[in-house]
Image (cartoon, helix red, strand yellow):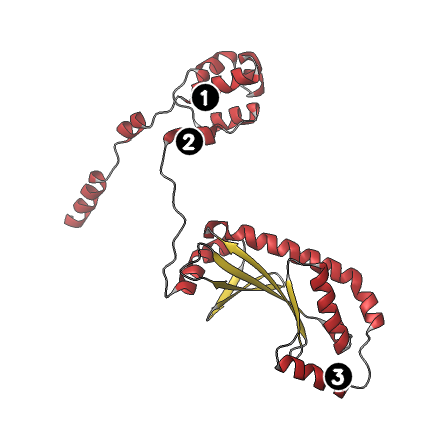
Amino acid sequence: MRVSFFCTTFAQDFKPNTKRSMNKNRVPVGELVSNELERQGQSVRWLADNACTSLQDCYKMLHATYLNTDVLRRLSIALNHNFFADYAALLDLPETPPPTLEQGTFNKQFFALIEPILKEAGYKGSIDGWTMTIKKGNQAIDIMPYHEDWMDDVSICFEYVIRGKFLKQLSELGRIILAHALSFINPAFNISYRHRSGRIVVKYFCNVHDTRKFIYHLNEANDLYNDLLNDLDRRLPDFLKAFPCPETRDKQLEKTIDHLHRWRIK
């Protein structure tokens, strides 16, 4: 009983004074609507018809200090004006600062901030050291953040991998030329061919200032990557025809390519 009493008392002590708070932040919502109606040169009768209400109720709304959200929504639609934004601006509330990242455990901090955003967008993922790999459907994306003390933003690398049977149907030279052709046509990406794995790696770089807008950058990268894949589908038949995989391996070419990759010349 003592615990129950304490909890009840604690809740009462910290219960906000709703009446006092409402009086302090009271905003004449009806006046906002009335001013916008006058600005657009429309009549009260017109507003009543378009907001699906009676003329008498409409006059009450225009003189009201308080309107429920459903009424304000209907008025916003009728006048094609966001009264919710006007209301929020008049409250003069402090802006919520974007989440900050501590140094030292930067990657863990960053991944912890974007994880709920990714889950809400339908992604599943795992973390391996400095990299987070996310999946949605058949698409997998590696996310690699980078940050220094002097940087205001976080540099992000989204890494995609092009793989498939069609690459095996191309000669080694054809894969290299295909990677360079895609890079030339799609300058938003850094594209390279990995000789040892036989894959084409596509990287997209961007700077993120606010982690809450992370999904916007991810969606933009995905849209550009899908455009790249569509472009690849159009050009692939010509590449398969021009650079078919030979029946016998060109050992000299493989040795040369291996040598170039060893010296990191791509």
Is 217 drawn above or below residue 164 in the view shown? above
Label 1 or label 2, whichever lies nearer to me, is 2
Asked whether disc 1 touches disc 2, contact meaning CB atoms under 8 Å apart, the reply is no
Residue 227 drawn at (x, y percent): 70, 56
- Residue 164 in percent (x, y) is at 71, 71
Residue at image position (79%, 60%) is: 234
Relative to 133, 60 lies left or right: left
Q: Which residue is mark 3?
A: 253
Location of mark 1 (residue): 32
Provide residue 132's location: percent of width, then percent of height. Answer: 50, 65
Whether label 2 touches label 3, CB < 8 Å: no
Count up the numbered dots: 3
The amino acid at mark 3 is Leu
User: Who's the residue at 23% across and 40% down the image?
Assistant: 14
- Residue closest to the eye, 211 or 62: 211
Q: Earlier in the sequence, mark 2 or mark 3?
A: 2
Tag 3 or tag 1, which sits nearer the N-term? 1
Q: Specify the label residue 208 is tagged with.
A: none
| Element type where label 3 sits in the image | helix
Quick one: SS at disc 1? helix
Give how far apart the Cα atoms at labels 1 and 2 are.
12 Å
Judging by the rendered image, the residue that carries numbered circle 2 is 89
Q: What amino acid is found at the position of numbered circle 1 in the picture? A: Leu
Horizontally, residue 1 falls left or right of residue 119, namely left
* Image location of residue 205, percent across then percent down: 57, 59
The quarter of the picture where the C terminus appears is bottom right
Assess disc 1: are there few (<14), some (14-19) or many (≥20) residues with their C-alpha within 10 Å of its C-alpha.
Answer: some
Q: Residues within 10 Å of mark 2 (few under 14, many from 20)?
A: few
**Horizontal relation, residue 65 to residue 38: left or right:** left
Q: Is residue 244 above or below residue 110?
A: below
Q: Amino acid at mark 2?
A: Ala
Instruction: Say if mark 1 contacts mark 3, CB within 8 Å.
Output: no
